[in-house]
């Protein structure tokens, strides 16, 4: 049983079928084909307005290129200190921003608060010696599995407007947040002030399906050139675009995310009901972060269950992981089988009972 991430499974059948269908015959290269055009038009429908769409193959590429168009080489991009862009992308954003820096702020659940961001921006020295803030980036879902509410996004958007920052959203798990909030893509993004989005589909059924979605035309101006320089203008672009046709058809993307979130809820409720187990952060999408006794951690691993341990830096202030405890992350996906979740819960429950009897 593997709960290490939501990218440990392959691509979903509708996505693969769409690729197979797009495979036949000759078509214009470099996304100048009819499928790519159709998918771009579909993005306009989904976001209820004209958007610019750039297909890329990884979330790191989406983030790095999106930020490079929003931040000049002398600028600062504000993010959470645990953000994927600062912690897990080997410096790609800074590399593509050509010298600009990421400034990581603290915040419970890897979430930024608008008043704290505003206070940070206000406190920055305004001299030519200091890098001026030019963008804010948030992850929706956050790295601790939390979802920004619509009013929280709007409040951050307002701070960006007030201070002249571009607002970037890392949506590697965009749709898991979307179905959790039960809102539209427009409501979660440009209607709340988001200027540019990394739209992830790989974790939710794609093979390598990521897109930069741009709501502010000036940020899209040079993105074709930036993408080409990053090797992300894909010659057989139709096979990348086709994935989105399968993904969006018949609400497949929404169904996949609803399933992943449902599995996480089941796992979360089962684990948090066990004696000695509590949640580090509430389960709001498809990631569960229980704090468990180390003996249970050992037993789960011995049973062959795969998952990762997690950092405690963004726990609520009152919460600490004890010396005999472990904070772990379990991730569910569109392909997680309910029987595997139930089996994990059985193993955990019998281990907790066994330890209590000792
Ligand atoms: C928050 C977040 N952003 C972006 C990514 C994209 O990463 P990758 O470059 O592996 O597609 C991930 C993947 O783990 C992620 O969790």
Image (spheres, rainbow, N blue to C red):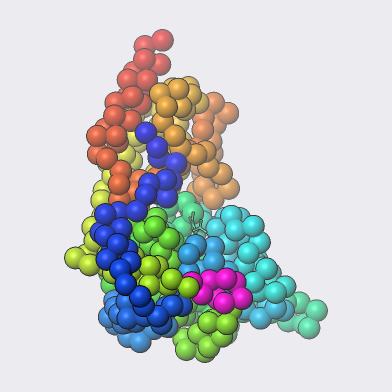
When the figure is inspected, residue 353 is found, relative to residue 284, above or below; the finding is above
Is 231 included in the stretch rendered in magenta? yes
When the figure is inspected, residue 78 is found, relative to residue 356, above or below; the finding is below
Horizontally, residue 98 falls left or right of residue 28, namely: right
Tell me the quarter of the picture where residue 19 sits: bottom left
- Asked if residue 77 can be seen in this view, the reply is no
- Magenta stretch bounds: 227-234
Residue 80: x and y in percent read: 57, 61
Q: Residue at x 43, y 77 (%)?
A: 29
Residue reaching furthest to the left: 250
Residue 337: x and y in percent read: 27, 40
Q: Residue at x 55, y 76 (%)?
A: 227
Tell me the quarter of the picture where residue 355 sits: top left
Q: In the rendered view of the protein, which quadrant contains the N terminus? A: top left
Residue reaching furthest to the right: 129
Residue 63: x and y in percent read: 53, 68
Residue reaching furthest to the top: 358
Total marks shown come to 0
- Asked if residue 354 can be seen in this view, the reply is yes
Q: In the rendered view of the protein, which quadrant contains the C terminus? A: top left
Q: Nearer the viewer, residue 325 or 220?
A: 220
Is 226 included in the stretch rendered in magenta? no
Q: Residue at x 25, y 39 (%)?
A: 338
Residue 78: x and y in percent read: 60, 69
When the figure is inspected, residue 27 is found, relative to residue 81, above or below; the finding is below
Q: Residue at x 60, y 58 (%)?
A: 89
Q: From the image, give the main secondary structure of the stretch colored magenta.
A: loop
């Amino acid at each position: 049983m593997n709960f290490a991430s939501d990218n440990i499974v392959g691509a979903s059948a509708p996505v693969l079928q769409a690729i197979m269908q797009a495979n036949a015959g000759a078509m214009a290269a470099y996304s100048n084909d009819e499928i790519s055009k159709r998918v771009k038009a579909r993005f306009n429908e989904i976001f209820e307005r004209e958007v610019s769409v750039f297909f890329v193959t990884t979330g790191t590429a989406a983030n790095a290129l999106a930020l490079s168009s929003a931040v000049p080489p002398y600028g600062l991009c504000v993010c959470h200190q645990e953000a994927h862009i600062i912690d897990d992308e080997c410096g790609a954003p800074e590399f593509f921003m050509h010298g600009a820096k990421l400034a990581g702020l603290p915040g419970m659940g890897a979430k930024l608060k608008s008043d704290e961001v505003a206070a940070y921006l206000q406190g920055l020295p305004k001299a030519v010696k200091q890098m001026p803030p030019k963008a804010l980036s948030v992850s929706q879902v956050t790295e601790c599995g939390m979802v920004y509410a619509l009013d929280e996004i709007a409040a951050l958007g307002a701070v960006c407007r007030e201070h002249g920052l571009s607002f970037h959203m890392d949506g590697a798990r965009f749709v898991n947040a979307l179905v959790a909030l039960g809102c539209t893509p427009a409501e979660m993004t440009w209607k709340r002030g988001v200027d540019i989005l990394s739209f992830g589909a790989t974790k939710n059924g794609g093979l390598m399906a990521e897109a930069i979605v741009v709501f502010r035309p000036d940020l899209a101006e040079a993105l074709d050139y930036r993408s080409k320089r990053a090797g992300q203008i894909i010659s057989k672009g139709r096979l990348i675009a086709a994935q989105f046709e399968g993904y969006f058809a018949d609400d497949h993307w929404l169904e996949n995310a609803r399933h992943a979130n449902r599995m996480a809820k089941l796992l979360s409720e089962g684990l948090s009901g066990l004696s000695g187990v509590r949640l580090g952060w509430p389960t709001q999408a498809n990631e569960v972060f229980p704090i468990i006794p180390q003996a249970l951690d050992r037993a789960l691993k011995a049973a062959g269950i795969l998952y990762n341990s997690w950092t405690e830096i963004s726990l609520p202030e009152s919460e600490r992981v004890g010396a005999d405890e472990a904070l772990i992350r379990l991730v569910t996906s569109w392909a997680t089988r309910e029987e595997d979740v139930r089996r994990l819960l059985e193993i955990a429950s019998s281990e907790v009972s066994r330890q209590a009897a000792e």
